[in-house]
Amino acid sequence: MSDHNGCLESEQGGGEKLLVVKGALQNAITRVLGGWKVSLLAACFPSLAQDNKDFIETIRVNIVEVVQKALLEDFDAIIDEDIVKALEEFSTAVKNSSGPKGTVAWRPTGDPELDMMAHDAKILRYEKQHLLESLKRAKLASSKAQEAVEEGYKKCHENQMEIQKNLSVINELLETSQAINEGHISDLCQTVFSRPSD
């Protein structure tokens, strides 16, 4: 257990918060395992508890050490793999990022009111930029919708013109058909009335 404590404390690149997290995990594990009393094992092994209480205590101490070491190694591996790796990637990304030229990093002035105003101004600038981008997207969507409406009106007008054209053809056909029918009726009437009566 002491070797592992040294491993946790000697980690270089961790930072104070990481060490605090590791220390808190170690304390929590120690407290949980400290609750494993001899009476718990004695209840599981009543014959050993009566004959050899020291043996039960030895088993308990060995189990606690093995479990504590395994848990600390697991937590250490999780922290190393997940947190430290993520911190290193973030640090590399920050170093490699090319921010706006001439930008001065904000530092607290010590005056809470000024610091809050500076923080609010930064948030408001971000929100303003976000709103401007949203407005730009909305205008683009609106112009596309307007184009679609105008295209629809154009097609509707073309369809109406086509309908008018077809209607004029149909009207001409109807007039011709009526004229033919009237001519046939007239001829038929003349034929019927001009027949000699029997």
Image: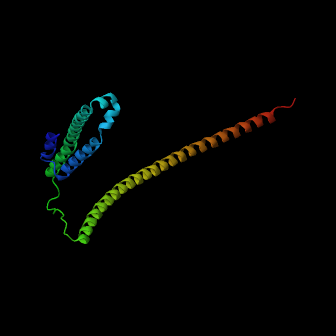
Q: Residue furthest front?
A: 51
Viewer-closest of 138 and 148? 138
Question: Residue 75's spot in the image, x, y percent?
Answer: 23, 41
Q: Is residue 42 left or right of residue 193?
A: left
Residue drawn at point x = 70 percent, y = 40 percent: 182
Q: How is the image coloured?
A: rainbow
**Residue at the image position 17 percent from the left and 56 percent from the top:** 99
The answer to which image quadrant residue 116 occupies is: bottom left
The residue that appears at 77% across and 34% down in the rendered structure is 191
Q: Toward the viewer: 97 or 79?
A: 79
Which residue occupies the foreground of this view, 154 or 174? Answer: 154
Q: Is residue 159 left or right of residue 195?
A: left
Give x and y (percent) for residue 195.
Answer: 81, 32
Quick one: quadrant of the C terminus?
top right
- Residue 178 lies in quadrant: top right
Q: Position of residue 133 (x, y in %)?
A: 31, 57
| Of residues 35 and 75, the one drawn nearer to the viewer in this rendering | 35
> x and y percent of residue 190 in the render?
77, 37
Q: How many marks?
A: 0
Q: Residue, x 14% and y 42% (percent of image)? A: 7
**If the image is split into quadrants, where does the N terminus sit?**
top left
| Residue 17 against residue 40 in the figure, above or below | below
